[in-house]
Structures are given as C-alpha cells and as structure tokens.
C-alpha cells in the first residue's frame, strides 16, 4: 500500500484525536476573534429592543439536554436581554425531557438579574399536547396552564395580568432542536393568533428554516452556537457561545484541512492508477 | 372477524380522515375543540401503547437473561435503571427541585441524563469529521461544486474564516438565503405533494399495507 | 414728497395683494369636514368569532390632515337612545390616518372581500382592553377629525359570530380536490396501460443488499425512523418493510427491526408476519424480530449502535424520518462494512445520509418506493398523479412570477386576481 492509500484509509481514531485537540486547546487558550452579526439574528434583537417595558415575551425552550451546548447559550442571552428591557417573561417548553433544564436556565438568569418569580417572570413548565396545547393557549392560557411549574395558580400571578390568550403576548421565540418547534408554533400559533414569532435552533436545522425567514413567517432566526455568539455580542454580554466560537473556528479549519488532504491523496492515487494503466497498455502493445 | 380487522379500521380511517381534512376549513371554535379532544385521545392511546412497548422490552431482556446470551448482565442493569428511575420519579412527584433544593430525580436528571445525552450529541462532531474525510472527494464535477460550497460555508460561519477571507461571510449568507432556501422549498414541495397523495390513498383505502393481514 | 407717497402706496398695495392671496381660502380649507360616507359594520367573515369589521367609503382625495376614529359601544346602551343616533358612551378603539386601512391591504382574497378594494376597512378584535362577545350587538361609529373639528357618522350595528366555513381557503380546498382528482384519474389510466417509472438506484439495490446478507449469513437491520404512525414517512417505511420482509422470508435471513414507537412496532409486527405468510414461510417468522427499545432519541441510537457493533448486520436500511441521530447510526453502520440504503423526507439529514450511505432515497422517492417495488397499477398511478401536481406547480411558479412582475412594472391590479388563487396554500 502506498503512502497516499494508507492516508486515504487512515484509522478514524486519528481523525477523532485531531478534532478532540482542535476543540480542547482553543477552549483552554481562547483568542477572541471579532464576530460579525447577521441580519437574521439582529432582527430578533431589534424586535425585543423595540418592545416597551412591561410587554409580554414568551420563550418556549423546545429542546432537550442533547442540544444544551447550542441552545442553552441562546436561552441565556435572550433572557438576559428580556430582563434588561424589563419585559414580562413567560417561560415554557414543548419537550418533556427539557423541563428541568428550562427551569434551571430561567431561574438562574432571573436570579442573576434580580427578578422575582410570579412578578417579573413565570415558568409554566410542560403540558402534553403540542399543537392542541398551543391552540388551547390561544383560546385561554389559564385553561392550558391552570398552575405554573411550582403549582402556583396562574390566574393570580401579577406577571400574567392582562394576558388571557396568545393574542395578548407581544413576542414569542421558540428555541427548537427539532419537532415540536418553530414550525409547530407557526402552524398552530402565529397563523391563527397573529402574534410575532422569532426562532432559535441548532445549526443543523437552521438551513431548513430559511424559507420561513424569507417568507416572513418568522421575523428572525438565531442559528446554532454562532447565532448565540452573535446575540451575546449584540447585548454586550459575552458568555459560553463566544467562548465556544474559537473552538468552532479551529475545528472547522481542521475539517477543511482534512478534506483538502484527502482530496490531494485521492488525486495522487488516481494519477498513479492512470499511469499504471497506461504502462500496462504500452507493454501489451509492445508484446 | 374480517369486519373488525379490515372493514371497520378502513371505515374509521375514512371518516376521521375526511372529518379532519375538512376541519382545517372550519374556523368555528367547535372545530378547534374537536381537534383538541382528538389530540387528547391520541395521548391516552400513546400512554397505553407505551405499556405495550415496555412489555416488549422486558420480555426481550428476560429471554436474554434466561438464555444467558452474550451481554446478559446488562439486561439486569436495564431493569434496575428503569425501575429505580420510575420509583424515584413517583416518590418526588416528577419534580426536579423542591423548595430550591434538588430532589433525587433532579440528581438523576442533572448528573446522568444531561451528560449522557450531551455526550451522544457531541460524538456527532467527531463523526462529521470522519464522514467528511471519507466522502468529500471530488469524484465528479458536481462533487467538486459541493466540495467548494462546503468549504466556503464552513469558513463563512466561523470568525476565523471571516477574518482570513472577509467575503466568505457574504457568500455564505447568499448561499444560505438564496440557493439553499430555493432548493429547500423545491424539496418541501415534492415532499408535501407526496405526503398529500399518500394521505389520500390511506383515507380512501387504496393503501392498506399498514393494516397487516392478507389481501382481499 | 409725492414720489415717496406713491412709492409707499405701491408698496402697501403689493403687500396687501400678497396678504389677500395668502388668505384666500384653499379648496381644503373651504370644504367643510364631512362625516365618513356609506359606513357599514358586520361580523368579520370566515373567522372564529369575537371580531367585527367596519367599512366606509374613501374620499375622492384623502386629506392627510384628517384622521378617522373608530368608536365602539355596547348595543344595549345605544338601544336606549333613538335608533340611528350616534352612540353614547362609546369607547375609542383606534385612530387611523385617512390614507390607510384599505380593503386591498387586508388578507382576504378577491372572492371573499367584504367591499371594493378602494374602501376603508378596520377590523375590531377582542383584546386586553375589551372583549367582543359572540351574539352580542355592538354599535360602531366612525368619526372624521381634523384639528379641532370632528364629525361622526350614524351608528351602525354589528353582531360578532363564529363562522362555519373559511371561504378564504376555498382555493386551497379546490386545489386539493383537483389534485385528488388527478391522482384518481391517473390510477384509472395506470390500470389500462403501463406507465414508465424512472430508475431509482436505491430501490434496485434492495435485492442486492438482501442477497449479500444471505450469502454472508449475517442479519439485516431495518429501522423505521423517529416518527409515529401519523407521519407519512413512517407509513412509507412500514410499507417498504413489508416488501423487504417478503424477500427476506424467501431467503430465510435474520431480520432485526428495533423500534422507537410502540404503535409502529405493533403495526410492523403485523406487516412482517403477513409478509412471511405470503412468502409461504410462516415457521421462519420470529415474534421478536420487531422489538421496542425506547422513545428517547439518543438512548435508542446508543442501543442500535450496540446492535450494529455486536451483531454486525450485512445490510442496514434507514427508512422514515430522522433527526440528529442519523449520522451516529450511519457512520457506525459504515464502520462495520454493511451496505446501507437510506430513505427519508427529513431534508436536514439528507447530507449525512448521502455522504455515509451507499444509496439514498430523497424525499418523495421514499413515498414512491412502494409503487416502484410492487409495480401495482394503483401505486404507480398515484405516483403519476403526484408528478402531474408537481408539473402544475412548476407551471404556476413560472406564470405567477411573470404576472407578479407585470403587476409591479405596470402598477396593474388584474394579475392579483390570478395570483390570489394560489395565495396562502398550505
């Protein structure tokens, strides 16, 4: 086996090791390159910025622990921004396995920003139904969630004053790792109850949501860890996402380098095979 | 018996299919109430179906233990994990925190489920690299175009790439917003038509393979 | 002195002329502010209730200084006053500029518009400040306001009601019926003569994959995806399982079908059993070939990866809808050297399947698989009907783009009549 052939069939574990090092080292020694903000992330930020204090902001954290690395920083950044703008925050989730994590993030950021449960924010938790849950929320929020995650009756909470249905919510953002997520909120929510809808999602499903963005079904989209980093830059509170961008940069370049190398070795193998084929034809012709 | 296994399911499928296809065109609150009610039925059926699934799981591992198949010890681990988590969950009423302190269920969630799920998702990063190394080869003109686009988007989505090649960010935005959106829409149209056709076949009883049983 | 005097008088004359011209009443100043004309109020058409609309005629030239105020009062209050009199104790709902809120700016298509496009329209919906109760009469008044002037129209009554039919979606229903008709007609045509189907390499490779597994004496792994039985992709996967199981049965190869959903497991068990019966191999059927693992995404993935690494199936089929687990499954399968055939409508996972699998069925090729493998006229006819639908949509996109461009270039409204027919299709 030639060197090129050996490299093309290299043991996967060497590739895993390269990726592992490319992720770990920048986290230990960050560089901190500038991050350009995309229009779709800015759109979400600007809409929250335009809401007057006291407006109702619903954040649906539709993800499970597997998507925590990408969507948790988005949730933190959005909540920080919303609390800074003194919006009334309503947290919930459509994914039962994400309930504990959603409660964790909203409680943690609220504590950090000095906000009070029941007065400045509420965490409704999870309720079964997905589409029918959203429809019920659109008709009567208190029927969908008679009590919040901590068993406080929702109808008596000051934070939900004057909010009876989804029509009374000024902005809904769904942070989604798949189905149920942004499309569910659009089909069962915005299409019927006409509130403004924004989205946040994992990097892998972001390209699939651009048609919704282009047709203005959602007003903005925060895609993956990069989107979270852009949002952190916008609110001037750099956190986990910005810290992760250096690692992501180096890892992307490592993959690019590996792909280029693989193609180079592949080209060498093909050239060699073509030359061997030509030599063999030549020898046969002579004979 | 044939009526219960064939005609009745087909009749139910037809009636429910037509009713809920037409439900979309009825804005009256009664129509939404009907949808909500039927969704609740689905959840109840799903709950019962879970019993079916868990029974199958228990049976499969019981057979494994009885036959002492390779790895039968892990079947005991599965039983213990499942029963313990259910017991703890019922004991604390499914809550991860109680008066600010973490419950045992919360401990299992935070220190077992969250890291394990995160680890599985993180493996994707390594697999993407090994899959890209193995498959991103310029075997043809189309493959070469794919390769170039992939490299530009990978560069454009990270600060280092935009720092080294500032235009990669703009090209990436254009690829995502124009090319990608157009192609996704095309795939979506095809998939949607296919789904409508399949749904019509099932509602009108043309497609019956999902019922099992024999052909008539 | 006389010269100076005549100069001053000329100056005074000039100044007074200017002042006279300046103070001449303009056409707007001269016209009295008149109340809005042809005011009508009615229940909002094609909605779920809790809302009324008010319509009034647009002026020939809308003065930008004029504002329209929409006032609402409870019908019972004004019933105590004289009929037709302006409502008393009315609530101000909105104040809009005179050059806004036209019928043409609303969401209604042309066949469901409540008035001519040039008329004004305002929709009054229940909100935080007040609730409109279905069945309760309300009096709506429109007032024109300009500076300190204000004139009101007569009050008109409207009763909000929920509607049974959303006429705005009529185009949607008609197109679905048309498409259904095309599918049924194609099925009839397919029963009479053979219809050409292009080659789908992934489906041609199914036999090859099953044959390879039999030769190597290794099992076949078949996954039906993450969805439940309500998803078309899962249904398609179950139908294909039937065909695959029939061929597997004839070779008596082992079949492993781990599931994420118990209902899908029950359905696939029946399908597999039937396939073995049809292949005349009922004894070869194993009850536990279809088994449930878990509904959790990554727990299921870990379990299936374990099965792949331990049992080393020779052929892996990934049919249905998938999410993040797709690459974990296919990359592990590739490491065992299995031949892999995938079919999914999850477009976000297609890149991963295409790079790691030997064959991939993209989107509707998955739905076509049943027709392709069986060649039954009904199945093939449906495929043909789908293609007719796609061709129609392609044509409409081309024509629609042209019409929309013409409409914008020539400021014409007539293209909208045709474009509205395809509006809001979902």
Image (spheres, rainbow, N blue to C red):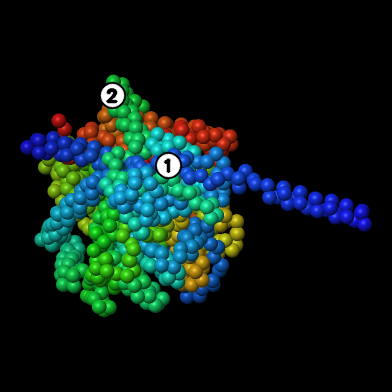
| Farthest residue, direction left | B1
Q: Earlier in the sequence, mark 2 or mark 1?
A: 1
Which numbered tag is attached to residue A73?
A: none
Q: How many marks?
A: 2
Q: Secondary structure at mark 2?
A: helix
| Farthest residue, direction front | C2
Q: Residue at x 80, y 50 (%)?
A: C14
Residue B37 percent location from the top left of the image: 20, 50
User: Quadrant where the N terminus of chain C lies?
Assistant: bottom right
The quarter holding residue A9 reads bottom left
Report the side of A119 relative to A24 (left or right). left
Question: Measured along the vertical axis of the image, is residue C201 above or below residue C52?
Answer: above
Q: Residue at x 51, y 73 (%)?
A: A30
Residue B86 visible somewhere in the drawing: yes
Residue C318 visible somewhere in the drawing: no
| Farthest residue, direction top | C192
Of A117 and B215, the residue lying toward us: A117
Of C44 and C60, the residue lying toward us: C60
Residue B148 percent location from the top left of the image: 54, 50
Q: Are marks 2 and 1 on the same chain?
A: yes
Q: Secondary structure at mark 1?
A: loop
Of C46 and A228, the residue lying toward us: C46
Report the side of B205 relative to C339 (left or right). left
Give the number of the mark in front: 2 or 1. 1
Q: Residue at x 49, y 51 (%)?
A: C150
In this figure, which residue is indicated by the disc labeled 1?
C39
Which numbered tag is attached to residue C188?
A: 2
Q: Mark 2 Cα within 10 Å, few/some/many (few <14, many 20+)?
A: some
Question: Measured along the vertical axis of the image, is residue B134 above or below residue B193?
Answer: below
Report the side of C319 relative to C392 (left or right). left
């Amino acid at each position: 086996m030639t060197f090129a052939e050996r490299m093309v069939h290299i043991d996967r574990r060497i590739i895993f090791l390269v990726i592992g090092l490319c992720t770990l080292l920048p986290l230990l020694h960050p560089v901190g390159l500038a991050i350009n903000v995309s229009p779709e992330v800015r759109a979400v930020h600007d809409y929250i910025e335009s809401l007057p204090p006291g407006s109702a902001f619903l954040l649906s954290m539709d993800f499970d622990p597997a998507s925590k690395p990408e969507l948790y920083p988005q949730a933190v950044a959005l909540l920080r921004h919303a609390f800074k703008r003194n919006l009334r925050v309503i947290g919930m989730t459509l994914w039962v396995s994400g309930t504990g994590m959603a409660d964790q993030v909203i409680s943690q950021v609220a504590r950090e920003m000095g906000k009070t449960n029941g007065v400045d924010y509420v965490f409704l938790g999870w309720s079964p139904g997905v589409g029918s849950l959203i429809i019920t929320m659109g008709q009567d929020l208190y029927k969908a969630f008679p009590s919040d995650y901590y068993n406080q009756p929702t109808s008596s909470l000051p934070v939900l004053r004057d909010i009876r249905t989804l029509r009374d919510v000024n902005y809904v953002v769904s942070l989604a790792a798949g189905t149920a997520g942004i499309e569910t909120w659009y089909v069962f929510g915005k299409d019927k109850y006409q509130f403004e809808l924004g989205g946040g999602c994992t990097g892998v499903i972001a390209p699939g949501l651009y048609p919704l963005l282009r047709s203005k079904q959602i007003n903005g989209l925060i895609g993956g860890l990069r989107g979270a980093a852009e949002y952190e830059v916008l609110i001037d509170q750099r956190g986990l996402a910005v810290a992760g961008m250096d690692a992501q940069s180096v890892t992307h370049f490592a993959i690019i380098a590996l792909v280029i190398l693989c193609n180079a070795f592949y080209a060498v193998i093909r050239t060699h095979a073509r030359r061997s084929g030509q030599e063999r034809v030549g020898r046969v012709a002579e004979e | 018996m044939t009526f219960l296994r064939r005609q009745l399911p087909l009749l139910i499928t037809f009636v429910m299919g037509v009713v809920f296809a037409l439900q979309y065109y009825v804005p009256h609150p009664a129509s939404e109430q009907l949808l909500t009610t039927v969704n609740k039925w689905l959840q109840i059926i799903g709950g019962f179906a879970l019993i079916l699934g868990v029974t199958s799981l228990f049976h499969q591992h019981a057979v494994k233990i009885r036959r002492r198949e390779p790895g039968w010890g892990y079947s005991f681990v599965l039983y213990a994990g499942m029963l313990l988590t259910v017991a703890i969950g019922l004991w604390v009423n499914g809550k991860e925190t109680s008066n600010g302190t973490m419950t045992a269920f919360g401990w299992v969630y935070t220190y077992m489920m969250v890291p394990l799920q995160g680890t599985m998702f993180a493996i994707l990063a390594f697999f993407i690299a090994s899959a890209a190394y193995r498959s991103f080869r310029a075997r043809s003109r189309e493959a070469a175009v794919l390769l170039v686009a992939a490299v530009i988007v990978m560069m454009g989505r990270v600060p280092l790439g935009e720092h080294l090649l500032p235009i990669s960010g703009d090209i990436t935005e254009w690829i995502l917003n124009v090319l990608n959106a157009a192609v996704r829409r095309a795939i979506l149209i095809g998939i949607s038509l296919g789904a409508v056709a399949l749904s019509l076949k099932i509602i009108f009883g043309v497609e019956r393979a999902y019922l099992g049983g024999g052909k008539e | 002195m006389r010269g100076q005097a005549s100069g001053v008088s000329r100056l005074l004359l000039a100044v007074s002329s200017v002042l006279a011209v300046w103070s001449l009443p303009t056409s707007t100043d001269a016209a009295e502010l008149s109340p809005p004309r042809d005011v009508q109020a009615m229940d909002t058409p094609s909605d779920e209730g809790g809302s009324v609309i008010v319509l009034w005629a647009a002026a020939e030239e809308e003065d930008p200084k004029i504002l329209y105020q929409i006032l609402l009062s409870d019908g019972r209050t004004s019933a105590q006053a004289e009929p037709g009199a302006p409502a008393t104790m009315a609530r101000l709902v909105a104040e809009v500029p005179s050059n806004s809120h036209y019928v043409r700016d609303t969401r209604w298509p042309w066949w469901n518009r409540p008035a001519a496009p040039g008329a004004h329209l305002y929709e009054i919906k229940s909100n935080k400040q007040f609730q409109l109760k279905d069945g309760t009469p309300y009096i709506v008044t429109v007032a024109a306001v300009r500076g300190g002037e204000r004139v009101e129209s007569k009050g008109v009554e409207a009763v909000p009601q929920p509607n049974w039919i959303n006429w705005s979606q009529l185009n949607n229903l008609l197109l679905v019926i048309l498409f259904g008709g095309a599918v049924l007609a194609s099925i009839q045509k397919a029963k009479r003569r053979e219809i050409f189907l292009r080659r789908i390499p992934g489906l041609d490779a199914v036999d090859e994959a099953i044959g390879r597994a039999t030769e190597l004496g290794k099992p076949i792994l078949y996954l039906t995806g993450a969805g439940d039985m309500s998803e078309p992709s899962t249904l398609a996967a179950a139908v294909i399982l039937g065909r695959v199981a029939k061929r597997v049965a004839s070779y008596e190869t082992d079949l492993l079908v781990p599931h994420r959903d118990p209902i899908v497991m029950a359905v696939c068990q029946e399908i597999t059993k039937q396939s073995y019966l049809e292949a005349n191999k009922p004894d070869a059927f194993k009850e536990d070939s279809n088994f449930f693992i878990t509904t959790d995404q990554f727990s299921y993935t870990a379990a299936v990866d374990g099965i792949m690494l331990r049992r080393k199936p020779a052929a892996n089929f990934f049919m249905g809808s998938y999410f993040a687990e797709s690459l974990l499954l296919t990359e592990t399968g590739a490491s065992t050297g299995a031949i892999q055939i995938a079919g999914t409508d999850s477009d976000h996972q297609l890149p991963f399947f295409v790079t790691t699998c030997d064959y991939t069925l993209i989107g509707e090729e998955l739905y076509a698989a049943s027709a392709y493998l069986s060649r039954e006229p009904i199945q093939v006819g449906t495929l043909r009907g789908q293609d007719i639908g796609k061709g129609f949509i392609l044509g409409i996109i081309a024509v629609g783009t042209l019409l929309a461009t013409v409409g914008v270039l020539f400021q014409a409204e007539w293209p909208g009549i045709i474009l509205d027919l395809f509006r809001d299709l979902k």
